[in-house]
Amino acid sequence: MRKPKTDVAAQLKAVQVLAELLAQDLPPTAWSVYARSPACLHGNVEHSGSDTPDGIGAAHDEIEQWARFLKVDVVTRQNARRETLHLLAEGVHKGVEIEVVAIVPDDGGAWRERLGS
């Protein structure tokens, strides 16, 4: 059964914005396009070596680039078991909701020392 036209239209809008995002000088991201209205994209930054302080810091740097593009602050959420951190940049671009996340181990903040903060 075909989705309601509003959901299809939302996906088309999200794909158009995604094509624009891919042409930008932004970190590579794995994308999901949701079949719902309003238009929504979910990106997952997968940084190799993200289990080391340098890798966690690099993942944070990449999320920070997305946050600057979306004109938002990075939000850090700890998962329920306190094993991982979700670094999030959530905003709207051209009417499409965009969420970009990096999931990294919670190393107690050792990666922040790498940044000198």
Image: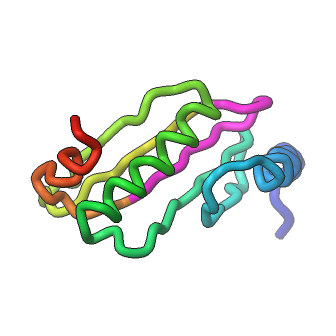
Would residue 103 appear left or right of 40 to someone viewing this image? left
- In the picture, measured across the screen, residue 54 lies left or right of residue 63, that is left
User: Image height check: is 92 above or below 34?
Assistant: above
Image location (x, y in percent) of residue 40: 67, 45
The verdict on residue 61 being magenta is no
- Residue 7 appears in the figure: no
Give the percent coordinates (x, y) of residue 51. 27, 71
Considering depth in this image, is 53 or 76 the residue closer to the camera?
53
Which residue is pictured at 45% across the width and 67% down the height? 47
Left or right? Give the position of 100 relative to 2: left
- Horizontal side, residue 86 vs residue 5: left or right: left
Rendered location of residue 16, percent (x, y): 88, 48
The answer to whether one can see residue 98 in this image is yes
Among the 4 quarters of the image, the one containing residue 74? top left
At 84% across and 47% down in the image, what residue appears?
20
User: Which quadrant is home to the N terminus?
Assistant: bottom right
Question: Which residue occupies 65% across, 37% down?
Answer: 97
Q: Which residues are magenta?
A: 92-102
Identify the residue at image location x=34%, y=64%.
55
Rendering coords of residue 28 (x, y %): 63, 62
Nearest the eye: 101 or 63: 63
Q: Specify the principal SS of the magenta part.
A: strand
- Who is closer to the viewer here, 19 or 117? 117
Vertical relation: 57 (above or below) 70: below
